Image (cartoon, grey):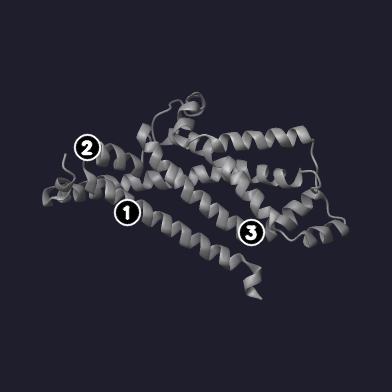
Amino acid sequence: MNFANAFTPAKLQEAWEIFCNDFPLALWETLYVTILATLFAIVIGLPLGMILVAGEEGGILPMPKWLMKCLNVVINLLRSIPFLILIVMVIPLTRMIIGTSVGTVASIVPLVVAAFPFVARLVESSLREVNPNIIETAQSMGATPVQILLHVMLPEAVPSLINNFTLAITTIMGYTAMSGAIGGGGLGKIAIMIGYNRYRYAVLYLAVIVLVILVQMFQSLGTRLATKCDKRLKK
């Protein structure tokens, strides 16, 4: 099909009808899949990131070297696998948890598997930014490693964590679009199945525009929240 013919008045009218009829549900699917996958990824990735910092040699709670090495290898391995390939690799896990490997809900499992190693590294990066002098002060006052992690390092790293979690949620939103290529729902399904495969390029561009707007909204909200939580800006 000629690309120019995809933007005739008839095609634009058809795209507008699809936008009005199909986009509301697709938008809702994208939002709840993104938010749920991000929450699950944080639940798994946050403690892993804390262990990566606290458990290293010279950390506040040193752990066996073999354990830390295995943890780093697993995280690096999962991060190195392209998302589309990862979806196929975790199909047995998805079927075991959800009962099927196709559909909007089923896409949450590979999204979490792909995202939690990324979140763990982001948390590790945020915690490493904490001033070592604050940690040493807490240790000199007799605080336990768990108390230092929960009451010193995490509160001090909140602005950085919010910024990094914002990065995570926008990245996961991009993954949801890719999951539409193999049966996932949301805006990605509309963009690929209806827009690209059926040569309705106006629909494809509409889906991209909506995704860009969503990313900008989440990014602006995260940046504003991080700024409000940054104690250094309140002095």
- The image quadrant of residue 215 is bottom left
Amino acid type of the residue tagged 1 in the rendering: Ile
Q: Amino acid at mark 2?
A: Arg
Q: CA distance from mark 3 to mark 1?
A: 31 Å
> CA separation, marks 3 and 2?
45 Å
Task: Specify which label sits upstream in the sequence, 2 or 1.
Answer: 2
- Circle on res. 158: 3
Determine which of the numbered discs, if any, sits on residue 109 in the image. Answer: none
Q: Residue 141: x percent and y percent?
A: 87, 59
Q: Kindly report the distance in space between the C-alpha atoms of the residues bearing marks 2 and 1.
A: 19 Å
Q: Report the side of 144 relative to 124 (left or right).
A: right
The kind of secondary structure element at disc 3 is helix
Q: Position of residue 224 (x, y in %)?
A: 52, 65
User: Residue 198: which numbered mark, if any?
Assistant: 2
What secondary structure is found at the residue carrying circle 2? loop
Q: Determine which residue is flagged by label 1.
A: 209
User: Disc 3 or disc 1, which is closer to the eye?
Assistant: 1
Q: Earlier in the sequence, mark 3 or mark 1?
A: 3
